[in-house]
């Protein structure tokens, strides 16, 4: 199994913090967002390579991070070539770029580099292997304004996803979907087909409604907190939640 971490955004809503530092390398509770995500990925024994898709501006920064990070997995950093927000490829296009560059032909975990969460990715992988189908994650959110800023789904009694809407103006449920997905090996070529048809290459959730018309997708429901870090306010919320380790002195 491979893991693709999408870290190519320019995070313009967080300027000036992200003018010279990519969002995944911002500090939250004494560690970077990316380090915390990597800790989650390291829980999965079947993952043998972690692939970061960076933009051109911060490619060298992520190369330097990878050189210092200690992992038993192979870490690969790719450069999608974008140098500013106006010329970004988009998350779906970045994922497809990684699949082509690394010639990935096996089940793949996909994560956005700006989400922190409490639940175990190993439990998500176990669910995926049991379902033998593409899987997404979901949790209940009471705040309707927050629901308007994420993917929202309807599911049947077995957890099969019936509908998916990215950033709905009127959410149809309280089931929010963070950008944490597991795609089967035979699904990966469909990303190229999706883009060739001229579909939206931006937010990673845009691919899901298109996929639902072709394959079964199941939702893994998790408990605990999830922080989508996109604004100064959400960054501060995450920093309040992730406190520094207690002093040993």
Image: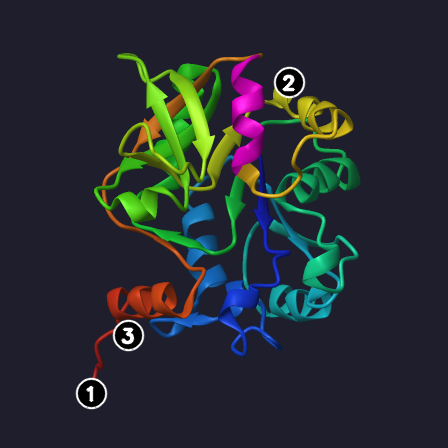
Alpha carbon separation for disc pair 1 and 2: 53 Å
Q: CA distance from mark 1 to mark 3?
A: 14 Å
Locate residue 26 relative to residue 242 in the image: left or right: right
Q: Earlier in the sequence, mark 2 or mark 3?
A: 2
Is label 2 in a helix, a strand or a loop?
A: helix
Observer-nearest residue: 125 or 224? 224
The percent position of residue 197, horizontal first and vertical second, equals 75, 24
The tag earlier along the polypeptide, 1 or 3, is 3
Q: Quadrant of residue 176?
A: top left
Magenta part, dominant SS = helix
**For residue 37, side relative to residue 87 (left or right):** left
Q: Residue at x 35, y 68 (%)?
A: 233
* CA gap, disc 2 and disc 3: 42 Å
Q: Please identify the quarter of the rendering in which residue 203 is found.
A: top right
Q: Residues within 10 Å of mark 3 (few under 14, many from 20)?
A: few
Q: Nearer the viewer, mark 1 or mark 3?
A: 3
For image coordinates 30% across by 44% down, the residue present is 119
Residue at screen point 52% across, 17% down: 212
**Residue found 52% across the figure and 48% down from its top:** 112
Mark 3, secondary structure of its residue = loop
Relative to 140, say whether 13 is above or below.
Answer: below
From this view, report whether residue 246 is shown above or below residue 201: below
The magenta span reads 205-213
> Tag 2: Cα neighbours inside 10 Å, few (<14), some, or many (≥20)?
few
**Which residue does the numbered mark 2 point to in the structure image?**
186
Q: Quadrant of the N terminus?
A: top right
In magenta stretch: residue 194: no
For label 3, the residue is: 244
The numbered mark, 1 or 2, whose residue comes first in the sequence reads 2
Q: Which residue is mark 1?
A: 249
């Amino acid at each position: 199994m491979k893991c693709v971490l999408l870290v190519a955004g320019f995070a313009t809503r967080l300027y000036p913090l992200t003018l010279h530092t990519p969002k995944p390398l911002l500090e939250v509770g004494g560690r970077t967002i990316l380090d915390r995500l990597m800790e989650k990925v390291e829980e999965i024994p079947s993952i043998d390579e972690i692939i970061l898709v960076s933009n051109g501006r911060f490619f060298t920064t992520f190369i330097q991070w990878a050189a210092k990070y200690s992992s038993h997995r192979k870490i690969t950093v790719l450069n999608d070539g974008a140098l500013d927000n106006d010329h970004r490829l988009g998350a779906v296009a970045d994922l497809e770029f990684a699949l082509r560059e690394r010639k990935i032909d096996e089940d793949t975990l996909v994560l956005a580099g700006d989400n922190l969460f409490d639940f175990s990715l190993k439990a998500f992988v176990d669910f995926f292997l049991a379902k033998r189908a593409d899987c997404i994650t979901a949790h209940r959110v009471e705040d309707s304004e927050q629901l308007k800023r994420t993917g929202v789904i309807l599911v049947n009694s077995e957890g099969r996803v019936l509908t998916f809407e990215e950033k709905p103006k009127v959410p149809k449920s309280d089931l929010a979907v963070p950008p944490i997905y597991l795609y089967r090996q035979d699904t990966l070529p469909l990303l190229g087909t999706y883009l060739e048809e001229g579909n939206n290459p931006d937010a990673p959730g845009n691919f899901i409604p298109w996929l639902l018309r072709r394959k079964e997708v199941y939702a893994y429901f998790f408990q605990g907190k999830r922080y989508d870090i996109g604004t100064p306010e959400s960054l501060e919320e995450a920093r309040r939640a992730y406190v520094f380790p207690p002093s040993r002195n």
